[in-house]
Each structure stands twice: as structure tokens, then as C-alpha cells.
Image (cartoon, rainbow, N blue to C red):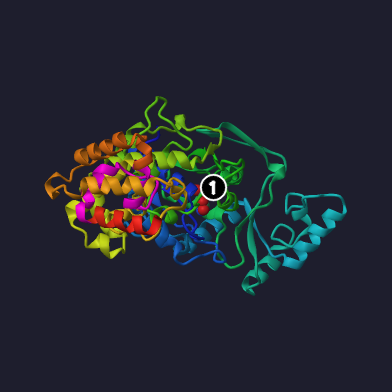
Amino acid sequence: MKGNIRVRFAPSPTGFLHIGGLRTALYNYLFAKHHNGKFILRIEDTDQNRYVEEAEQDILDSLEWAGIEIDEGPHKKGDYGPYRQSERKEIYHMYADELIKSGAAYYAFDTTEELDQMRERLVKSGNPSPKYDSITRQSMINSLTLPSEEVERRLEAGDEYVVRLKVPRRETIRFDDIIRGHVSFESKGLDDQVLLKSDGMPTYHLANVVDDHSMEISHVIRGEEWLSSTPKHVLLYEAFGWEMPQMAHLPLIMSPSGGKLSKRKAESDGISINTKDYMKNHYEPEALINFLAYLGWSPGDDSEIHTMESLCNLFTLDRVSKGGAVFNHKKLLWYNENYLREESDQDIAARVKKITDDPSILEADDQFLENAVHLLKDRVSKIDELITMGSFFFHDPKEYDENALKKWKADSSELVSLYRKNIESLSTEVFKADTLKTHLEEVINQQEVGFGKLMMPLRIAVTGLGFGPDLFTSMELLGKETVLRRIDSALKKLD
Ligand code: GLU
């Protein structure tokens, strides 16, 4: 492995951080930490049309929430800054000049109309994908076709221009990718890539290569969608005479209904695509990280639950798969349950208070809340579900679950009344789960009915629901007064 390991996560601030972007960041981070290297955040904000102001903050918040620590970046000083591309314009200009001087790039002055005309002409003559390339460049207005005085004149006059890469006519461009092995592309499919735009900003390709080189990036780990840009980068590295970082293109994240997990696909599959939604919807960050780590990688054994630290220890690029990885939301919930269950009742109760605005929960006695959490936490996937499912601990049922009511039968009122009589005289000290259960058994034995015949209506009366945590323990926690009041009210409403 090459000397110092330095990797970068290089998002464009064009919107909220995509879950796939978070996985890319995570793999970079795990790789860096595995090798005692550095994880760098570089903001690729050269596309002014797509720039979204809040995006950078969203990226920072998302990474922080996920536990991915930045070693160098716009807000973390390092020796290779600035870490925002918009602040590095001069650097790109300097390198673009260098390419022009060496003959690897050239100025092009063509107007939009001229470019359109060229494309139309080529389409008419039977070329379905017209390009500005080694053939067409010869009949366009650029520093290869104009006399040098004319080029000088135009530059001095401030005429608009772009800088283009002189892509060779017929060449096989080869590189090795750690995940995909040997990759090759034919240069004849490539455009003479614009490197500097007429607004003076570099394109992604120039800025990316210049920065990866000048920030001494050792490994470029990014999504598969950038694979087809890599041949252009190879040409740029060659033109500069620079050693190329090692490349690793991560597999696509696939939607459960097939195809790439695009924004639209995710929507129709009911999957949230932005990290922010997972934050907002109270997912456990450790669970999301664990899940994402396994979305395209595995340590090669049966283990599934790993902390960030253990992921850092285990992660290697040779165990990243080539094929797409399907986003399985159920699996994510499974991870979430696991992490939630490991947390203490006390911690969860404190967090519940932070995320709810229900005054009854906010003012609840800590011990009561912790007990409720204890009863509920094995039955939910996410912390916010504790609040919905456990609402009955804090509120008398206002209405009764419609499905559950189907189980409220003709004899239900009578059975519940009998049970009520049976427990009415219990003192608060013995109003305990065991006793409450014994009394229920007494009633069903006397009445010669099955357990469910009384259990279900009783649950409906006390909780309003047809499911939930252990009923007797819940009744014990609610206390005698509340239980009797709820039974009375149900008997009145449902009889
Ligand atoms: N700015 C690109 C993005 O938005 C970076 C791609 C790369 O890592 O080279 O993902």
C-alpha cells in the first residue's frame, strides 16, 4: 500500500446528502481509519447553476450525525486547503495554462450557435452522436485552427472561450480499478472535454484531477456512476505527467423493485433517499451506518452487528462487491431494533423526552417512563414508535382501534364486568401482574371460556388497541385507579 493513505469525500452541494453519498463517505472513512490515514471533505461547488446554499451544512450535519469524523475540510484546518473548489479558481487556471502550453489542451471560441450548427450538420450526415473531437475540432474556431495572433487578439479582447482537452483520436485508455479490475475505454467515444468553462470555472473533471493530485489523495473511492469519467481523468493525469491515485468504483445501490435506486424509484418504493430524513425520522445512526456498510461489502463471515470501530478494523476494499446491492428497508429496521434494544431504558426514556412534544410524556415521572420503555422496546423498530405505541400509558383511550373492536363480542361486556368486580377489591400493593393474571384465569375458568375471550376485550378496554406489550404488567404500571376508570368507560361506550 502506497505511503500515506489520504482519501476524500467530494460531494457537490446540489441538494441534501443522498444515502448513496453517505455510503461513499462511509467507505472512504472506514478505509482511511483502517490504514491510519486521513479522511478529507472537499466541497465540489463549481457548478454555479446547481449550487444549493444549505447543502454544505446538510453534508456536515449528516456526517456528524453518522459519526464520520473529518480530518481535513472547509471547517477543519489542514495543509492542503482551501477545501472548497470555488476558492481554488487560480489553481485551476494555472494548470489549464500548463496544459495549453504543453499542447494537451486548447482554447475554443465557438459560440453556442456554432456548436449547434456543427451538431446538426453531423446528425444530417448520419452521425447519431456528434462530438467535438479530433475530427470536428479541425473545422471549429479554436486555437488549433486560428493563427496564433488571432488567438492572442481574441483573448486580449476578452472574447468568451472555453479550454478543451485534446482527446487522442484512437487510443485505448486503460486503468486498474481495485474493485472492478482491469478497465478499458476507447478514446474515440470521448468528447474533447471542456476543462475550463466560459464563466472561468473549471469543470468537474479538471478540478477533480487537479485537487486529487494537489491534495495528495492516494485512493479515489467513489460511486460507479463516475467510472465513465475516469478515462478522461486518466488522460489528464498523463497530460500532467502525474501519478494517478488508485481507483475504486463502488457498486450501485439498487432499488428493491429493480434498477438503480434513483430519487423517483425510491419514492415509488417508499424509501427515503436523503440522510436528513433518517435523522428526522429518528433512526439510530449506528444502525444506518451498520446497514450501509453491508450495502456492497461484507467481512466474509456471518457477523452482522458491528460498531463503527469494529467496521474500521474489518473494512477492506477487496471485500467490496462488483454487483449492485439492493436496499432492503426491512434489514435496516432490523439493525435499528438491535441498536435500540442495546440501549438502557434510562437513556431511551431521556431521548423520548427530547423528541416528543406530548406534555403528558414530558411531565411523566422518570421511573414510570422508564418502565413503559422497558415494556415496549422489544416491540418496536424505532424510538418514535415507542411514543405512538406507548401512548396508552399516558392517555385514556379516546377511541378504540377498529380492527380490535371486531374482537369485542356479545359476551365481552359481561366478562369484563366480572373481571372488574374480581379486581376491584385488590389493594394497591397487590395490584401486580401475577395477581391480575390469576384473577383473569379465575374468571375464564368459572365462565368456561377461552383465555382470549376475556383477554382481548380487556386489552381493548385498557389500551384501546388490539396488540401491545404484556397486558398484566402494563396494568400494574398504569395502576388500579386508571385501570378501573378505563374499564368503566369502555363498558359504557362499548356495551
Ligand atoms: N463531485 C462529485 C460528486 O458529486 C465527486 C465524484 C468523485 O468522487 O470524483 O459525487
Location of mark 1 (residue):
240
State which region is magenta.
455-481
Q: Nearer the viewer, residue 62 or 273?
A: 273
Q: Residue 450: where, in percent of width, then height? A: 37, 34
Going by the image, does 100 lie left or right of 190?
A: left
Residue 372 within the segment the image draws in magenta: no
The response on whether ligand 1 sits within 8 Å of label 1 is no
Q: Is residue 271 left or right of residue 472?
A: right
- Tell me what residue is drawn at x 37 percent, y 61 percent: 398
Is any part of residue 27 visible from this angle? no
Q: Is residue 176 visible?
A: yes
| 465 falls in the magenta region | yes
The spot of residue 151 in percent (x, y) is: 68, 66
At x 55%, y 55%, the residue is 204
Location of residue 300 in the rendering, given as x and y in whole percent from the top left corner: 42, 25
Picture coordinates of residue 237, whole percent (x, y): 54, 45
**217 up-or-down from 304: above or below:** below
Q: Residue at x 38, y 45 (%)?
A: 467
